[in-house]
Image (cartoon, grey):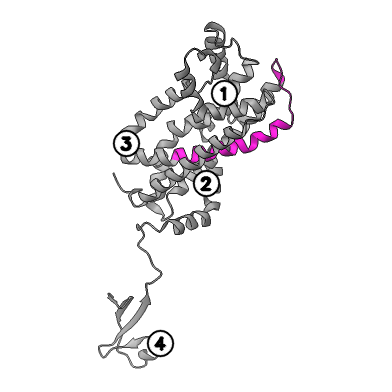
Amino acid sequence: MAHDDVSGAIVLTSTLPSRPGDSASIGAESLSSAGTAVVRVAVDDLDEVSKRPGLLAYIHRLWDRRHFAIADAKAHAYQRSHGTALGIAWLVINPFLNALIYFLVFGMLLQTSRGVENFPAYLVVGLNFFTIMRTALNSGSGVMMVRNSQNLMSAFAFPRALIVVSWTIRQFREFLPVLLATLLFIVLIPPHAMPNWHWLIVIPVIFIGFVFVFGLTLFTSVITMAFPDMKFIWPLIGRFWFYVSGVFFSLNMFESMPLVTTVMQINPGYVFLSMNRDLLIYQTVPSLGTWVYMIGWAVLLTLIGFLLFWSREETYGRNR
């Protein structure tokens, strides 16, 4: 068997037996004097496996494989609790144990609760909702480097951003029981925050938050693939981000420090937490400017992250 490229086609040649009547089985194939069948195969619609497709084609391929991302997210959700006695319950227990520690250390010992209305709910919402953003730095940044992702990329040809899509969906699934437990907490623990129509507006806020997380994961995963040492830096950045996002203290503590106040107010993490607290605890609808600002962050970061990720599509999955 041999092949040559002739005028946009692959020509396959195969030596045939010279027994009488064999040429009748060739059909539309052309037969040379040497008893060779020649088959022309059009290659106009074929692409190299490792070649990066155009942006629109790339998005189209992602959409075609959306069911795989959903199925993969479902299969790998709640893996952290596998093999434990309490199982999925740890997804709920762990955040509230952390909240208890922060309440004792910061709320009671350091008195960061002063001036904060309904501090227990303020703290729990801050911790549980900020976790989805911090996780994008701590584990999402390395999602392309874990063994499962590397094995998947070695075995199949698909848009690599599908891995980030699946990871983001998985984080959303794992956040749902935490969200329900948070709502139950702020209702039962005094001073109570009772359900009302404001709670419904939390749904689009959470959606914006996960769009932000998706863009952040795209961006940080590209950086980490190019510079693997960043996997040690992202958790440090995440810790700093955690402390400047007002998770366990109020912005009112820094009224005499306008620079700190400004930095916190332009911090998307703080804005995201404030929107959720206003709706769930204080029954206040965020201002239009706040909505525009948070949506702008989510859309811009996703566009930048996606374009950067797509530009390096051909580098993912190579043996390092």
- Return the x and y of residue 13 as percentages of the image width and height: 30, 79
Query: What main secondary structure does the magenta stretch of the protein show?
Result: helix
- Boundaries of the magenta span: 188-217
Residue at image x 49%, y 12%?
Answer: 256
- Return the x and y of residue 77 as percentages of the image width and height: 54, 38
**Whole-number angstrom distance, CA of label 2 to CA of label 4:** 44 Å
Query: Label 2 near label 1: C-beta < 8 Å?
Result: no
**Whole-number angstrom distance, CA of label 1 to CA of label 4:** 71 Å
Residue named by callout 4: 28
Residue at image x 55%, y 15%?
Answer: 252
Query: Label 4 near label 3: C-beta < 8 Å?
Result: no
**Whole-number angstrom distance, CA of label 3 to CA of label 1:** 30 Å
Amino acid type of the residue that numbered disc 3 sits on in the rendered structure: Pro
Residue named by callout 1: 126
Q: Is residue 206 magenta?
A: yes
Residue named by callout 2: 72
Specify which label sits upstream in the sequence, 2 or 3. 2
Amino acid type of the residue that numbered disc 4 sits on in the rendered structure: Ala
Specify which label sits upstream in the sequence, 3 or 4. 4
